[in-house]
Image (cartoon, rainbow, N blue to C red):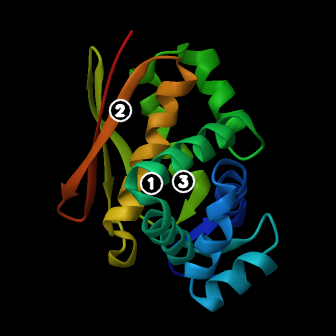
């Protein structure tokens, strides 16, 4: 569908819409109506394997946050990524990482960049900057300005929290600004 500029797989954004419909069904239509008409129309007509403007995914994150608040939006994004990691979108990658590293968050964050590259095009580069016992720092650099909005960065942080869910550990991911992107600090314990 889209050949240039920041893109995301429509399957990812459509999965987020599905999670919204299942987890906050009373708010799903309100979230959709908060999207610009061209985004609504584009999402409904995009083929599952299509690349769509990443700005549409960011618009969904903003709309969701505006309707159900930051905590609810973060929960939806985390659930959507957890489903991606067990489904066709990222399931193969997640399974391979688990076979190689086991259920270790620090080791799985090493593959965050691969997952980002699988989901996105021309949307920056994600890499593990450092890891220590119970903590990992993931950096997203080269992020286009249109995607560097707080709601979208928070959705990305929630997606990184899904790794903690896969590893069955408690924890969270904080996001902060970086010169041309963002810095995500994951912390976990037992």
Q: Position of residue 19 (x, y in %)?
A: 68, 51
Please identify the quarter of the rendering in which residue 145 is found.
bottom left
In front here: 23 or 131? 23
1 vs 3, front mark: 1
Q: Is residue 132 left or right of residue 19?
A: left
Badge 1 vs badge 3, beta-carbon distance below 8 Å: no
C-alpha span from label 1 to label 3 = 16 Å
Name which of mark 1 and mark 3 comes first in the sequence. Answer: 3
Please identify the quarter of the rendering in which residue 29 is found.
bottom right
Disc 2: CA contacts within 10 A as few (<14), some (14-19) or many (>=20) = many
Q: Which residue is mark 1?
A: 155
In front here: 119 or 66? 66
Q: Is residue 10 left or right of residue 71?
A: right
Whether 142 is drawn above or below 70: the answer is below
C-alpha span from label 2 to label 3 = 22 Å
Q: Is residue 65 left or right of residue 43?
A: left
Q: Position of residue 53 (x, y in %)?
A: 58, 77
């Amino acid at each position: 569908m889209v050949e240039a500029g920041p893109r995301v797989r429509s399957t990812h954004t459509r999965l987020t819409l599905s999670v919204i419909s299942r987890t906050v069904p009373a708010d799903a239509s309100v979230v959709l109506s908060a999207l610009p008409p061209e985004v609504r129309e584009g999402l409904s007509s995009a083929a599952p394997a299509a690349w769509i403007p990443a700005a549409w995914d960011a618009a969904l994150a903003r709309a969701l946050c505006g309707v159900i608040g930051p905590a609810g939006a973060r929960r939806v994004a985390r659930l959507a990524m957890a489903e991606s990691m067990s489904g066709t979108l990222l399931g193969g990658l997640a399974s391979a990482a688990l076979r190689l590293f086991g259920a270790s968050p620090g080791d799985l964050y090493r593959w965050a960049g691969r997952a980002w590259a699988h989901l996105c095009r021309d949307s920056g580069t994600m890499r593990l900057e450092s890891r220590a016992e119970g903590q990992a720092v993931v950096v997203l650099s080269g992020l286009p300005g249109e995607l560097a909005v707080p709601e979208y960065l928070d959705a990305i942080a929630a997606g990184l929290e899904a790794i903690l869910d896969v590893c069955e550990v408690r924890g969270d991911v904080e996001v902060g600004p970086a010169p041309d992107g963002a810095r995500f600090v994951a912390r976990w314990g037992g």
